[in-house]
Image (cartoon, coloured by chain):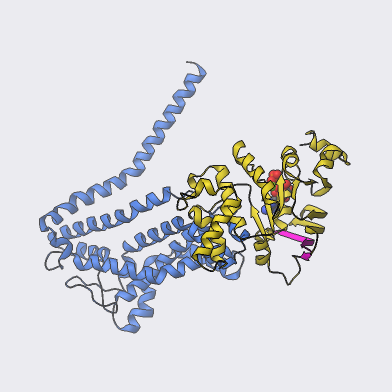
């Protein structure tokens, strides 16, 4: 065997090895999706549209779906503007005390156990208010959302080629206008990616809701100062029940959660590909 | 009114401890194309960015000495760098129209954000005027709402010339504007310089002696951060006084 044939064989073996390893790595993901599909589809099909629109006693998870959207929306309302400003500020003033502090703080917050956020918010909001509420849950989720959005915003700002920065300042713009009217729009796709990832993250959270939102599954939520349900929280509750029909419901709810997640995640993938400047 | 558009007095620039411009005294007449030439790394881009205080975006850069713009020191404490940058437009080595803005908005953005147009009609007129000055109007007049990504490199570069001209600057700095575009685009930009110098003073950075010879009225030769020789283009290329200059213009020094 010639040297070059040997090298080709080695390359081929290497490629096959990489292929197999990749397969092993992504197999669990497919397994999860397949399991959720197989177990989740039958209860949804059996119940029909009521599964999506009905209350729990009607055999549906409607209030939980609405609750998840409500919590995600409220937490975004609280968290996104602050996180966005923090991300921009930390990038634009990296040496300032606040800039350095936020960067360190963001790292910690990213890794912070989310259940502790729940305990903290229970202590400062739920207990003083005397009730679980959508607001308390959204506040906890906002704390979890913010570091993701801030870190992605920071990264998006960092990836703007320096020449665009020079071009905008070169037009005699103030720093505020150059940053917020030109550079932020240049990197809007990167920032949007962070926003979507943050929202997808909080839409699937359970732990921070345990002691903050309570739960509401027999009727639709109508106030942010009242308890509210959420799909992950409902799954958690249903799985603990001994009844098989509750378990089936939990699988159905899991499939709905997965679909919501994919509906957010696929656009993210698309927008990520487009982050070309 | 001062006869010089730009004048530097003992200009020194360093990045940290690294001094890259080592005491330059330069005078640039009004309404000329002044070519600043020299080999790669000699400090051309750095010096150019001192003329509109854009160097301040780089926190490590320290400027000493004076830069006079029509007789006024732009580094004196009472001068606002933002005002300076409105008077001194810039075109960069890499064609950099803003990718998220339409062709129209790329030209209009400086006017819009600085609130320099009274109404939409005035803005439209100024955009058109700038694109005509940049010899791009005929090519883009039917696609003002398109994004610049489909333009050729040469068109993009003329678009950013228009973006700079729309601000009605007095001086136009160009940092190797043809380094990244094709020969046809290069020719168009070079032709443009002849038109523009009637109204503006142009400082053109180039590493190509041939380009300097083609387009400029006066030349400065910068070498390792020192201004070796300045003069009319004719003199510099036909009878350079300094040996380094001679070596550079004949292509022996790279
Ligand atoms: N941002 C920076 N930080 C530190 N040093 C820098 C920076 N920019 C440039 N320099 C240094 O300053 C010197 C001059 O660089 P400059 O870019 O001004 O040269 P130039 O003549 O424009 O070169 P070129 O023809 O390659 O564009 C070089 O030695 C370079 O390494
Ligand atoms: Mg340069």
Q: Does the magenta run of residues contain B48?
A: no
Is residue A8 positioned above or below A82 on the image? Answer: above
Q: Quadrant of residue A113?
A: bottom left
- Residue B14 screen position, x and y as percent: 76, 56
- Residue A160 screen position, x and y as percent: 54, 54
Q: Residue at x 65, y 63 (%)?
A: B86
- Toward the viewer: A43 or B146? B146
- Toward the viewer: A246 or B24? B24
A210 horizontally vs A158: left or right: left
Highlighted range, magenta? B60-74
| Colour given to chain A in the rendered image | blue
Q: Does the magenta run of residues contain B67?
A: yes
Q: Residue at x 55, y 52 (%)?
A: B97
A173 horizontally vs B44: left or right: left
Q: How many badges with numbers are in the image?
A: 0
- Residue A177 screen position, x and y as percent: 55, 66
Q: Main secondary structure of the magenta part?
A: strand
Q: Residue at x 56, y 59 (%)?
A: B126
- Toward the viewer: B156 or A73? B156
Q: Which chain gets the yellow colouring?
A: B
Q: Residue furthest right?
A: B241
- Residue A245 screen position, x and y as percent: 12, 60
Is residue A86 positioned above or below B243 on the image? Answer: below
Q: Does residue B76 appear anywhere in the picture?
A: yes
């Amino acid at each position: 065997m010639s040297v070059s044939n040997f090298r080709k064989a080695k390359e081929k073996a290497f490629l096959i090895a990489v292929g197999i390893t990749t397969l092993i790595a992504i197999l669990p993901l497919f397994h999860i999706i397949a399991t959720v599909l197989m177990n989740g589809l039958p209860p949804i099909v059996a119940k029909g549209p009521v599964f999506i629109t009905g209350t729990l006693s009607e055999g549906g998870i409607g209030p939980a779906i609405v609750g998840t959207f409500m919590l995600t929306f409220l937490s975004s309302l609280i968290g996104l503007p602050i996180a966005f400003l923090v991300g921009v500020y930390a990038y634009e003033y990296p040496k300032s005390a606040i800039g350095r502090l936020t960067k360190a703080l963001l790292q910690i917050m990213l890794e912070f156990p989310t259940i502790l956020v729940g305990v903290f918010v229970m202590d400062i909001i739920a207990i003083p208010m005397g009730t679980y509420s959508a607001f308390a849950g959204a506040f906890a989720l906002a704390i979890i959302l913010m570091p993701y959005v801030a870190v992605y915003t920071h990264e998006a700002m960092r990836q703007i080629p320096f020449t665009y920065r020079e071009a905008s300042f070169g037009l005699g713009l103030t720093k505020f206008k150059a940053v917020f009217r030109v550079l932020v729009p240049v990197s809007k796709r990167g920032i949007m990616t962070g926003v979507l990832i943050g929202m997808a993250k909080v839409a699937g959270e359970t732990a921070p809701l345990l002691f903050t939102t309570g739960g509401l599954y027999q009727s639709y939520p109508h106030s942010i100062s009242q308890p509210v349900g959420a799909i992950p929280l409902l799954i958690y509750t249903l799985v603990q029940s001994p009844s098989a029909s509750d378990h089936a419901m939990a699988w159905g709810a899991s499939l709905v959660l997965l679909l919501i997640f994919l509906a957010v995640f696929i656009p993210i993938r698309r927008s990520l590909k487009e982050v070309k400047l | 009114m001062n006869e010089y558009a730009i004048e530097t007095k003992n200009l020194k620039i360093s990045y940290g401890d690294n001094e890259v411009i080592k005491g330059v005294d330069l005078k640039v007449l009004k309404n000329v194309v002044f070519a600043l030439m020299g080999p790669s790394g000699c400090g051309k881009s750095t010096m150019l960015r001192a003329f509109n205080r854009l160097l301040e975006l780089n926190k490590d850069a320290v400027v000493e000495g004076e830069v006079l713009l029509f007789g006024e020191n732009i580094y004196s404490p009472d001068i606002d760098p933002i005002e300076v940058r409105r008077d001194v437009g810039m075109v960069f080595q890499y064609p950099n129209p803003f990718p998220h803005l339409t062709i129209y908005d790329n030209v209009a953005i400086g006017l819009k954000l600085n609130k320099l147009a009274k109404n939409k009609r005035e803005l439209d007129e100024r955009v058109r005027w700038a694109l005509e000055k940049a010899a791009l109007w005929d090519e883009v007049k039917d696609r003002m709402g398109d994004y610049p990504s489909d333009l050729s490199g040469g068109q993009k570069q003329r678009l950013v010339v228009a973006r700079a001209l729309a601000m009605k600057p007095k001086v136009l700095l160009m940092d190797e504007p043809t380094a990244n575009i094709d020969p046809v685009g290069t020719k168009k930009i070079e032709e443009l310089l002849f038109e523009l110098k009637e109204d503006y003073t142009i400082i053109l950075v180039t590493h190509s002696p041939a380009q300097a010879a083609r387009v400029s009225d006066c030349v400065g030769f910068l070498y390792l951060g020192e201004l070796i020789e300045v003069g009319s283009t004719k003199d510099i290329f036909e009878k350079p006084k300094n040996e380094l200059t001679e070596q550079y213009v004949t292509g022996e020094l790279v």
